[in-house]
Image (tube, grey):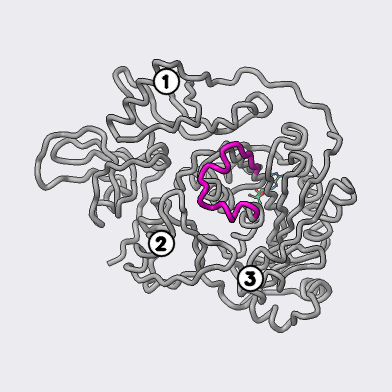
Amino acid sequence: MAHFNQNFLDSIERDLPSHLSMEDFIAYSNKPLRLSIRVNTLKISTENFIDLMSAKGWSFDPIPWCNQGFWVTISSDLQLGNTIEHLQGLFYIQEASSMLPPTALFDSHADNENDLSQFAQTRVLDMASAPGSKTTQIAALMNNQGLLVANEYSASRVKVLHANVARMGVSNCALTHFDARVFGEYLFETFDSVLLDAPCSGEGTIRKDPDALKNWDNNDNKGIVDTQKALIESAFLALKVGGCLVYSTCALSRQENQDVCHHLKTAFGEAVEFAALTELFPDADKACTEEGFLHVWPQIYDSEGFFVAKIRKVSAVERTLPEPKMQKNFPFTAAKTKQIEELTAYFEDSFAITLPTDAEIMVRDLEFWLFPKAVMPLIGKMRFQRIGIKLADALKKGYKVRHEAILALSSPTRFELSDEQAKEFLMGRDISLVEKVKPQGEVIVSYASNPLGVAKHLGNKLKNNLPRDLVKDKIALYQ
Ligand SMILES: C[S@@+](CC[C@H](N)C(=O)[O-])C[C@H]1O[C@@H](n2cnc3c(N)ncnc32)[C@H](O)[C@@H]1O
């Protein structure tokens, strides 16, 4: 049962549109949330995923605003996060309303969904990214093309963000770790699209956390609102003319939502245009404010509360601070032709993986990395935590492939494991082979034809090469 206090209820009553009732708001806030997931199309098509999981007792109900999103009913009490399919990155457990902002950001591209290279030159900024539900959704919408800069202020949450980006096979991402107020200054008018999924008071999440509003006090929000206003200004400055910004929160009050967008309009005047989201999906108008923002109250679509505004930058604005000096000492250099040839041959011969030619192979000491091309002009303008994916380490003789490369780059060859073998592999154990055969060296091991990682085939067993930090104590198996 959700715990509300009277201050909170009074504030909702003030902001709730007249066609919605307080009774429904309270009733839906007390109802458990429907379980929803998003299929990761970087790894599997939606149709194949539905086939795969229907056979395991799942049923699917499409989410109207996300082609890859589904409410699911599951005929077992398995912990979804411990299933092999989750660890393989085939899906992300994501609340339905949280899928709205990326859909709004890319709605003008929806008609060209099959043009897989339409984002090759596109730069997108996700200013407040962790744990990465929207970052990984955006990367999938971009089909790993172009550049996605994913920023997170909290150091511990950057780690979670990176784990999710790697699990989902994202390769077009550069991670940064800043207070996102800096983007307008460091990367002025650089991005075609910006998502600001802002830190907020989280009132919309009451259905997940009944205690979220126990001690709610309107006055506590002042600091958050100041941060939101500073961040939206920074987002707008970092946006190219003609580009769009999506501002979203899981807060319900006007102050953290509409007022923040109006603040931007006051600050930048005619350069700011609110883009109506009335047509984003059938019935979107039920949640639209007079400005065309989506204000999703829990009872409208039986979801968490959410707010989404789309804002277009229609003309140039003055930059507020001078361009910072370029930073030196970037530790990577471009790989030489011979190095590229050798590494390319290693990936081809060992794993039948063709390294993408629309990315840069970079070297740092003995490490080989694959950087998205679109990041190159930004090098030196700000510090990056991690760019693209690490491909391999050079050894005295040959290379050692990295797990994240195997998860991000597709290969037609694999060593298929059974349910029990896949479980053993993810628990970090070696796998004995019944028949002794000729050793095959490094092999990609897979489950249901989707890669799990790399093992060394020694003839009578598979030696486990799963990175230690990915080893699990528990794996949930469907019987
Ligand atoms: C609503 S959560 C983001 C959720 C994320 N977009 C997702 O979909 O998984 C807001 C995030 O903003 C981060 N944050 C807080 N203050 C920030 C700041 N000044 N700059 C950048 N990020 C900030 C928080 O640590 C938190 O991870």
Position in image of residue 108 (x %, y %): 65, 53
- Please tell me whether residue 227 is drawn above or below residue 358 in the rendered image: below
Gap between marks 1 and 3 measured at Cα: 53 Å
Instruction: Kindly state the secondary structure of the residue where label 2 is placed.
Output: helix
Position in image of residue 193 (x %, y %): 68, 45
Does mark 3 have its CB less than 8 Å from ligand 1?
no
Instruction: Kindly state the secondary structure of the residue where label 3 is placed.
Output: loop
- Where is mark 1, residue-wise? 366
Residue 182 in sight here: no
Residue 158, labelled with which disc? none
- The quadrant in which residue 45 appears is bottom left
Residue at left offset 41%, top offset 72%: 59
Labels 3 and 2 touching (C-beta < 8 A): no
Instruction: Kindly state the secondary structure of the residue where label 1 is placed.
Output: loop
- The quadrant in which residue 439 appears is top left
Labels 1 and 2 touching (C-beta < 8 A): no
Read off the magenta span: 108-125
- Where is mark 3, residue-wise? 282
